[in-house]
Image (cartoon, rainbow, N blue to C red):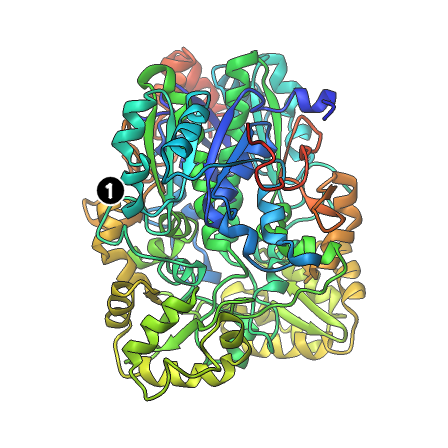
Amino acid sequence: MPTSPLTSLRPLDSLRIVVIARGVAAAYAARLLGTMGAEVVLVEPPQGSPLRRQPPFLANQVSALFAYLAAGFRSQVAELDTAHGRATLGALLSQADILIDDTPLAERKPLGLDEASVAQSHPDLVHVSVLPFGAHGPKAEWKGEDVQIQHASGEGYLLPNGLAVEMFPDRAPLKVHGHFGAMQGGIAAALGALSALWARPDVGGQFVDIASQDATLAVGAFAIQRLGDGSIEHRVERSFRYGGVIPCADGYVELLTLEQRQWEGLVKLLGEPAWALDPALADSLERSRQGPMINGNIRAWAAVRKVEDIVREGQALSVPLAKYYTPAEVVRDPHEKVRGLFQPVDTGAGVFDMLVSPFQFDGAALELRSGPPALGEYNA
Amino acid sequence: MKPLAGIRIADFTVHNAGPFCTHLLSQLGAEVIKVESAMRPDAFRKPHPVYGRMGPATFDQVASTKLSVRINLKKPEGVALAKRLVAVSDVAAESFRPGVIGRLGLGFEDLQAVKQDIIMLCVSSSGQSGPDRHFAGYAPLFGAWGGLGEMTGYADGPPVEMRHVMDHTVGMNSAVAVMAALQRRRLTGQGGLVDVSAREVASSLLGEALLMAAAGEEPHRIGNEHLSHAPHGVYPAQGEDRWVAIAVTSDAEWQALAALIDESGLAGDPRFLKAADRHANRAALEPVLSAWTASRTADDISELLQGVGVAAHASWTTPEIAADPHLRTRGAICEVQEPDGKHRAAVGVPMRLSKGPEIGIHRGTPKLGEDEDYVYGELLGLGRDERTALEDAEVIY
C-alpha cells in the first residue's frame, strides 16, 4: 500500500505489536495503537478470532464489530497448542515491542503465554495482559462479558438517570451501549503498553496487568469520591434536578445549564415566561429545590417544538444543548466530515465509512491502513 | 520505578476530562504542575450545588498527586510566567474552549517559541477544527452528539445521558495520545499538537454501530440485551433493588445454567437448546431465570455460576466496590489520607506493572499554591523578592 506523507509521520510508526484477542478489550488496545502507526499482527487460530463471529453483522455474516476493531491489522494463523504454532508466535514476538493478550489465565502456561515464560524468552517485550478482572486477585479467573464488567464497576448500578429512570423506576439498572467496559480496558491497556514502553530503556520489558473492571471503575471514580464525602449515589437521586433528556416534537435534546449565565440564556430561549422570571429562581439552590416544576415547564415547552429549532436558538444564546444523534446522523455529521473522523474502508462486505480515531495530531486526521484482514493473509 | 518519572506536565486543564488525563499520568510518575488562581480556582475548591456539595471538597480524585501553583493568566506577566513553566516542561495540557488559550497568548505556536519540542494537549467538546468547534459542552452533551446516548437505554424508552464516565473516558484517551506523542518525540525530537474531541471519543465507543449505519442499517438501543446471546441481562436478586448480571455465550454454558436451575425439562427444551433459538425465544426464557435468581443473593448467584463457567456478577453498589478485596488487592481501590488525617477510599490507576509497583496516588489534594517554593523557587529560580513582587502585582494570585 502506498505511504502518504501523513502516514510517515504517525506517532507510533516504528512500533510492532502482536495481539491475541478473543474479546474486545485486547483488540481495542491494539487498534488504538495501530491507528497511531504501529504495525499490528493479529494471531488467530485456524477458525479465526471469535470476534469474527460477533454481531452486529454486515452482509455475508461479516462482523461489523471485528471490522471496526481489526481495521489495519495483519492476520497470522497459528495453532498455539502445537510446537509449530508456538514457534510462529515466538518468531513474531522476537521482532515485536508489545504483546497484548487476553488468553484466559488457566490456558496460558501450556501455550507459553504466562508471565514468566514470556519474560524469559523475550526480556525486552512489553507483555500486556487484558482480562475482565485482571491477572491477579481472587477473581482473576472469573468470566466477564460487558454486562458484568459494567455492573461490577459501579456505573451499571447507577444507570439510567433522568427521564429513563423516571419512566421505568422499577426496571433493572442498565449498562452503557455495546462494549463500553471492555473498551475502557482496551484504552487502559494502550496506556499501560506505552507507559511500560517509555520505561523500557531503564528497566527492560515488563508485565502489564489490565482489568477491564479496574478501568471502568477508574472512569467512574467520582462515585467513590462521593462515598468518601458521605454520600452514596443512586440512579434515582443522581438525576439532574432539571434539564437532562428533554423530549421534543421530533426527537430528544440534552440540556444542561450549570452556570448562571447559561440559566439566564435558557430563560430567554423559553421566551421569558412568568414562572421563570420569579426572582427566587435567580438562586441556583432554589432552582435545584424547584427542579421538578422547572422541568415540567421545560418539557411542556419542548414537546411542541422541533429539535433543530431548539438547538439552533439555544446555541445562539450559549445554552448547552445537544441533539441526541442517531448513528446515521453521526456518520453524516458535517462537522465530522470536515474533521475527517470517517474514512471509507473495504470491510469485506462493501466499502463503507469507518470511524478512524477520536484524536488528531498536528491538525490532521489519522488514517487507517486498510480494512480488517482476511484470515491468515500475513501467513509466511 | 514509576514509568513516567522525569516527565513534567504544565497542567492548565479545567473541569474533569483534561484533569483526569493528567491525573492518570501523575499516578504513573509524571510531575504534573496544576495551574490555578484565586480568581479561577478549580471546581473542587468551590461548592457544587448541582451535586449537593455545599462547600469545597476535602479530597479531589483528579487533583491528587499533582503539584499546585497560582498564576493569574489575565495579566501579561502571568502569561510570561506560564511560558517559563512550559519552557521547563515536556507537555502542556489545556481544556478551554478552542481559541481561548491562543487569545491568552499560550497557543501552540507561542509555546513552541519557548520550548521547541513541546507537546501540547488540547481537550475540547468538539475538537479544534470544524464548524462546531466553538460549542460548549459537558459529558451528557458529548454522549448525545457522539451517538452513545442514543444507543444507550431500554429499547422502549428514551436515550440516556452519559455522566462523568464520559469525561474520564476522554481523559484516558488523551493520556494514550500524549504518550504516543512522547514516544514520537523520543525517536524524532519532534513535539506536536494533540487534539482530542470529546464527542468523537463518545463515537469511538460505538464504532461497530456507526459502521452498520454507514452500510444503511438502523441500529437501535437494546438495554442490557445482546444481539445474539441469551440469556443476557440483569436479573432481580434477593433484597430490595438488588440485581445480578448474567450472560450465557454458548450452548454448553446454557446447559450448565439449566442444570443449576433444575426445572423439569428446561435443559432439554428445544426452544433453548441452540443459541439462535434461545435468542429468538428469550422472552419465554427471562421469567424462568428471573424466578430462579429472585430467591438468591446476587453474590451467591455469581459464585455459583462462575463455578460452572458462566459469566455472572452482582450489580454492585458503590460501598460494595469500595470494600471489595479483589479491587483492593489490585490497587484499583486504595486508601488516601486527608489533611486532617482521616482515611478514605479512592480509585487507583487502572493497571499493575511488574516493574512499577509504586504507581498510584501518593498524595492527596494540594492546597492552592502549595508547591510554589519548589516550582517557582527550585525549578524556575525565582528569588523571594521577585516572587513577592509578583504576588503584590496579583500575578501569582
Q: Residue furthest bottom?
A: B264
* Residue A56 vs residue A35, the one in the foreground: A56
Name the side, left or right, on which B386 lies relative to B130. left
Residue at 48% from the left image edge and 73% from the top image edge: B274
Q: How many marks?
A: 1
User: Is residue B47 shown above or below A46?
Assistant: below
Q: Which residue is mark 1?
A: B339
Q: Quadrant of residue B177?
A: top right
> Regarding mark 1 in the picture, which secondary structure is present there?
loop
Q: Residue furthest left?
A: B341
Query: Which quadrant, please, contains the N terminus of chain B?
Result: top left
Residue at 43% from the left image edge and 24% from the top image edge: A91
Tell me the amino acid under the disc marked 1.
Pro
Percent position of residue B392, x then y: 46, 24
* Residue A176 vs residue B372, the one in the foreground: A176
Residue at 79% from the left image edge and 60% from the top image edge: A313
Q: Is residue A227 visible?
A: yes
* Residue A276 vs residue B335, the one in the foreground: B335
Q: Residues within 10 Å of mark 1 (few under 14, many from 20)?
A: some
Residue at 53% from the left image edge and 63% from the top image edge: A284
Q: Quadrant of residue A250?
A: bottom right
Q: Is residue B145 visible?
A: no
Percent position of residue B302, x then y: 28, 67
